[in-house]
Amino acid sequence: MSAQEQGGWYRLATIVLDRVPTRGEGAVSATVAALQAVVPPVPLAAMGRGEIGSDGWDQQWSAVFQSCADAGSEIATVAFTGG
């Protein structure tokens, strides 16, 4: 996959992430909202990769996984970009 295509998928992911609803209460809601703040939506026509893959992304993504586990819920992801 080319870097341009990967960037496009990452931009799309930021838009989808921005649309994940949160309730404004509880650890899961708080960690998802924090991840949304670290990775704001990037318009599809924009260039660049956004913040996916950054240190902030990695830290907040780990926090989302942990808060879901603490709440007794399993979370799964599917990766299909990159090497």
Image (spheres, helix red, strand yellow):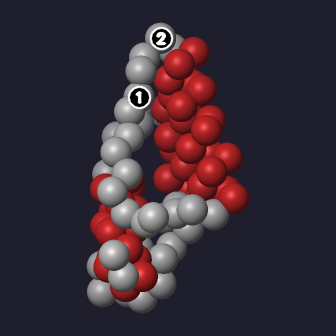
Whether 48 is drawn above or below 36: the answer is below
| Left or right of residue 38: residue 79 | left
Whether 13 is drawn above or below 23: the answer is below
Q: What residue type is labelled 1?
A: Ile
Label 2 element class: loop
Which quarter shows the C terminus?
A: bottom left
| Left or right of residue 61: residue 81 | left
Q: Which residue is drawn at 62% across and 45% down?
A: 60
Q: Residues within 10 Å of mark 2 (few under 14, many from 20)?
A: few
Could you say where residue 73 lies in the image, as x and y percent from the top left? Answer: 43, 17
Along the line of sight, the residue nearer the viewer: 23 or 31: 31
Label 1 element class: loop
Q: Residue at x 52, y 63 (%)?
A: 52
Q: Which mark is residue 75?
A: 1
Q: Which residue is drawn at 32% across and 69% down?
A: 9
Confirm whether residue 43 shows in the render. Answer: no
| Left or right of residue 56: residue 12 | left
Q: Name the residue under label 2.
A: 72
Q: Residues within 10 Å of mark 1 (few under 14, many from 20)?
A: few
